[in-house]
Amino acid sequence: MRIVHLSDLHFGTEFGNIVPELEDVLQQIKPGLIVMSGDFTQIGSRTEFARAENFIKNMPTPVFCVPGNHDIPRYHILQRFFAPYKRYRKFISNTLGPVYTDDNLIMAGINTARRVLPHWNWAHGAVSSKQLHFLDEAFKGEKDKFRICVMHHPLQKAEKVPLKVTVFGVKKAMRKIHDLKIDLVLTGHVHHASITVVEDTVFASASTATSFRHRVQDNGFNVIDLAGDYSEISHYGHQENAFVLLSTHKHKKKM
């Protein structure tokens, strides 16, 4: 099984030919599934969501999506508070908690973005008790399969990340991931690719795929190959008008 992990597309801030260049390399990589971990848009406008929808339609394989904090309308205040995911549901996906399963894989996604938080910075994230119960149900009876969880905000503390992130409920979420023996957690938000291992769970963040709003790293994405008891994570970066393979990490599945 080959999975491409894209994040933080931020349509409205894409530049040059980076979108068709990304589409070209995805055709070459030939994934079986594409995961997109939030921030499809910059300000949550209809125009940006339409661009994201068109991009998804051009994908060579099915997609698995969760929203990010930028997918809640920034300037439409009434919609932000009373229908924050109306546009996301229309243009991207009608579900905020998707589940994918096949003979070798079970994947569940949760929405860590919030319309408002008990913090001045509403860009931070949260994981609720209801969402942890959802993970219990999603991974029930699937112990022999690769177990992957997808969310926008990173729970782990990765090295050299250029953005400080607060996730309310992080301690309970990390405990649940450990208890459920989740093999891999895919996140975005920080525009910085990293791999961090915490108690045998691999946390992999992706950089921004197409936005000029990259920080320390160039644009990029991850490719995850699952085979036997191992996962191999490859990081691709954008260099000289093309995406190229930069590094690869191999990890053994939790038993």
Image (spheres, grey):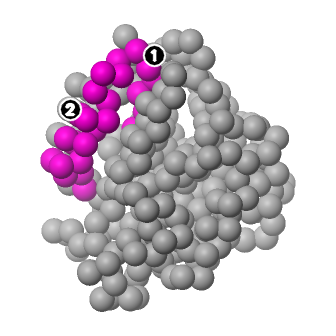
Specify the amino acid type for callout 2: Arg
- Residue 132: say if magenta: yes
Q: Which residue is mark 2?
A: 175
Query: Which residue is pictured at 54% across the width and 82% down the height?
Result: 46
Residue under the point 65% across and 73% down: 51
Q: Which residue is mark 1?
A: 253
Q: SS of the residue at dot 1?
A: loop
Depth check, front residue: 88 or 120 = 88
Label 1 CA crowd tier, 10 Å (few <14, some 14–19, many 20+)? many
In this picture, which residue range is highlighted in magenta? Answer: 126-149
Q: Could you give the CA–CA distance between mark 1 and mark 2, rounded to whole angstroms?
A: 18 Å
* Image quarter of residue 3: top right
Question: Does residue 199 sit above or below 56 in this rendering?
Answer: above
Q: Which residue sits at x=61%, y=75%? A: 50
- Label 2 crowd (10 A; few <14 / some 14-19 / many >=20): few
> Which percent across, then down, holds residue 84?
34, 75
* Residue 198 seen in the figure: no
Residue 104 in the image: state x and y as whole percent. Answer: 51, 21
Number of residue marks = 2
Please name the residue shown 82% across and 41% down the image. Answer: 28
Q: Toward which corner of the image does residue 139 lie, by quadrant? A: top left
Disc 1 marks a residue whose amino acid type is Lys
Vertical comparison of 76 with 166: above or below: below
Residue 185, disc: none
Residue 74 within the segment the image draws in magenta: no
